[in-house]
Amino acid sequence: MSVLSLIKQLKVKSDKLLVQKGQRDEALANLARFKEDKKYHTRTITENDQLQILLRNVSEYAKTQVKIHIEKVVSNALNVVYGGNHKFTLVIEERRNQHEVDYFLDDGLTVVKIEKPFVGKGGGKITVVSLALQLAVCELAGVTGPISLDEISKMLDSEARINLAYFLKEYSEKFERQIILITHHKELAEAADLHIHVKKEANGLAKVEVLNG
C-alpha cells in the first residue's frame, strides 16, 4: 500500500470509528472548534504546532488512531525515499495541561529523538519527516487549496530527490492537489507538469520562460 493511500484511508477510517463509538456529536463539536483554530494555520506555523492543534481537538480514541496512521505515513515516506526499514514513532504525553509530542526515528540500526523544530536538523531524512508530517496533517485537518513548497530538497542527494519527486507526483494526482514547487534541482523540476523557469541575465534583468512538463 502506498504512502498516499494510507493518508487517504486515515480520514475514512477515523470517521467510521468515531461513528461506531458513538462519538459523532463530539467529533462535530471538535470540528467546529478546529475550524476556528485553522485561521492560525499560517505558513509560519510548524508541523509540530499543526499536530498539537489537531490533537487538542479530537477525542482520546481518535488520538490513538491519528498516532498510528501518522506513524505509518511518515515511516513509509522515509522508506519510499531512502529504502530500508525506517520506523517513525510519536510519543504523546500530557504536560502542563496540554498534549506534547516527541518524535523518534529508528533506521534499523539506531533510535534517535528528533529535536524540534526540524529546520536545519538531521539532514535529508529529517527533511522527509517534516514534509510527510506536514502533508498528513494538512489532509487530516481538511486544509484546501494549493500547497507551496520552497527548496525542500537542499539536504537530499540526487537519488533521494528522484524518489521524492515520485512521492510528490503521486500525492498530487491521488488527492487532486496542486503543488507549487520552488527548486533549483532538476530532479524535482522534471516531475512538474508546468515549468516556470526564471534566470537572471547579464544585464541584471530576469528572463522568464514557461515550459510544459
Image (cartoon, helix red, strand yellow):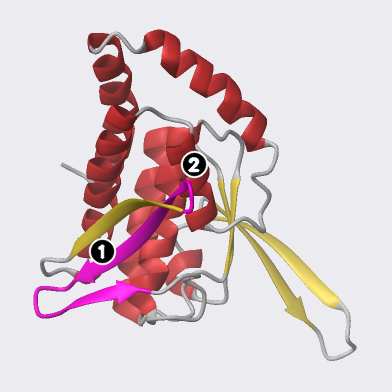
Q: In the displayed structure, does residue 124 sit left or right of residue 51?
A: left
Camera-side residue: 107 or 163?
Answer: 107
> Is residue 213 in view from this perspective?
no
Q: Residue at x 25, y 24 (%)?
A: 13
Q: Residue at x 35, y 82 (%)?
A: 157
Start-end of magenta stretch: 96-114
Where residue 47 appears, as percent x and y from the top left, is: 50, 56
- Few, some or many C-alpha atoms within 10 Å of disc 1 (few <14, some 14-19, many ≥20)? many
Image-quadrant location for residue 12: top left
Query: Which numbered dot is residue 175?
Result: none
- Quick one: SS at disc 2? helix
Residue furthest bottom as drawn: 202
Where residue 4 appears, as percent x and y from the top left, is: 30, 42
Seen in the picture, residue 58 relative to 155 is either above or below; the reply is above
If you read the primary sequence from the N terminus, does the residue marked by circle 1 or circle 2 appear first?
1
The answer to whether residue 183 is magenta is: no
Three-letter residue code for mark 2: Cys
Image-quadrant location for residue 58: top left
> Is residue 140 in view from this perspective?
yes
Query: Which numbered dot is residue 138?
Result: 2
Query: Which numbered dot is residue 78?
Result: 1
Seen in the picture, residue 120 relative to 106 is either above or below; the reply is below
Q: Quadrant of the N terminus?
A: top left
Image-quadrant location for residue 211: bottom right
Label 1 vs label 2: CA separation?
Answer: 18 Å
Q: In the displayed structure, does residue 193 sit left or right of residue 68?
A: right
Three-letter residue code for mark 1: Leu
Q: Main secondary structure of the magenta part?
A: strand
Seen in the picture, residue 70 relative to 125 is either above or below; the reply is above
